[in-house]
């Protein structure tokens, strides 16, 4: 007899298995990244078909399989519906999904961080969906990037120089080669560094420390240009670690 289990999971990817069925890649609260067959999901009027669309959070019952689980029941918890009618929201959500896919596919199934990562994705999609401005969207994506790296053990220390281990007062630079901040003294002989303004460093440190949903004094202050720079900085850092480039923004560049 097949074993079944229940979990909450957010859909990150969806592709056809055959004429009737799809495969859904999801991040689940209890088992991390899982792939499951959604039987009949490609048939018109399939209820399951609607539940297995990208970026929907479901409460699920699944039959455990050797390589693939099978979805027995799905009940949507949040459809994050406003993500789908805005190109910015959609692109950044795809970036989030791709990042999770790149990082979590090799993770241990019993990983104790699964619930924390699930909550982070849920909060990020929720905020992106309900955001009223592009600034709000970017702020949520930035929080996601900084916090995800921290959960996975790749967190950036925004305060200390990684060479002399002293707190950096001012004029910090970031070394992409080392993946860490350096004080101006230690940075002298390090190639491939970029200057990061003290206020930006303080801003990102604040996002790291505060709860996802807690408002900070920066929520209304950070403007679009600053947020875009911070996003690209974190994207480059993450791409460097994963050795995989998230492709979604390259595709958009071509389209535009
Ligand atoms: Zn130093």
Image (tube, rainbow, N blue to C red):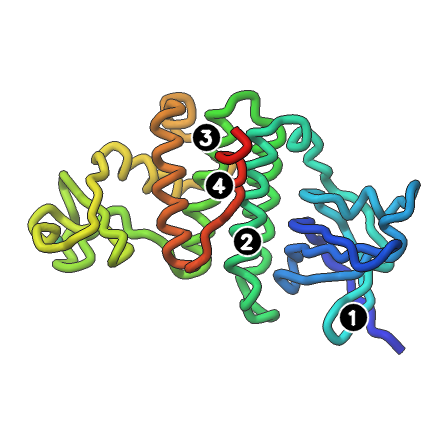
Quadrant of the displayed image that contains ligand 1: bottom left
Whether pointer 3 and pointer 1 mark residues with C-beta atoms closer than 8 Å, the reply is: no
Pick whichever, 121 or 39, lies toward us: 39
Q: Which residue is mark 3?
A: 215
- Disc 3 packing (10 Å; few <14; some 14–19; many ≥20): few
Residue shown at the point (45%, 52%) measured from the top left? 245
> Which secondary structure, mark 3?
loop
| Mark 1 surroundings: few (<14), some (14-19) or many (≥20) residues within 10 A | some
**Residue pictured at 75% horizontal, 61% vertical:** 36
State the separation of the CA atoms marked 3 and 1: 40 Å
Tell me the CA gap for discs 1 and 4.
37 Å
Which one is in front in this view, the residue at disc 1 or the one at disc 4? 4
Residue named by callout 2 = 100
Q: Which residue is mark 1?
A: 64
**Is 209 left, or right, of 48 in this rendering?**
left
Sequence-earlier tag: 3 or 4? 3
Q: Residue furthest bottom?
A: 1
SS label for mark 4: helix
Q: Nearer the viewer, mark 4 or mark 2?
A: 4
Residue 252 is situated, as x and y percent measured from the top left of the image, at 53, 35
If you read the primary sequence from the N terminus, does the residue marked by circle 3 or circle 1 appear first? 1
Q: Which residue is mark 4?
A: 250
């Amino acid at each position: 007899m097949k074993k079944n289990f229940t979990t909450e999971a957010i859909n990150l990817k969806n592709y056809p298995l055959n004429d009737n069925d799809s495969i859904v890649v999801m991040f689940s609260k209890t088992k991390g990244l899982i792939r499951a067959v959604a039987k009949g999901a490609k048939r018109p009027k399939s209820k399951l078909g609607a539940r297995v669309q990208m970026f929907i959070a479901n409460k699920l019952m699944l039959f455990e399989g050797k390589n693939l689980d099978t979805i027995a029941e799905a009940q949507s918890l949040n459809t994050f519906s406003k993500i789908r009618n805005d190109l910015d929201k959609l692109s950044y959500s795809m970036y989030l999904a791709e990042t999770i896919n790149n990082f979590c596919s090799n993770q241990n199934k019993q990983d104790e961080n699964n619930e924390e990562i699930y909550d982070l994705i849920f909060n990020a999609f929720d905020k992106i969906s309900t955001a009223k401005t592009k600034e709000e969207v970017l702020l949520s994506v930035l929080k996601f990037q900084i916090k995800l790296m921290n959960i996975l053990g790749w967190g950036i220390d925004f305060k200390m120089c990684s060479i002399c281990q002293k707190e950096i007062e001012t004029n910090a630079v970031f070394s992409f080669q080392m993946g860490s901040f350096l004080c101006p003294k230690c940075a002298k002989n390090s190639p491939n560094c970029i200057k990061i303004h003290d206020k930006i460093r303080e801003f990102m440190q604040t996002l790291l420390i505060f709860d996802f949903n807690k408002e900070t004094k920066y929520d209304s202050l950070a403007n679009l240009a600053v947020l875009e720079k911070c996003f690209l900085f974190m994207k480059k850092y993450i791409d460097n670690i994963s050795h995989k480039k998230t492709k979604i923004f390259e595709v958009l560049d071509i389209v535009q």
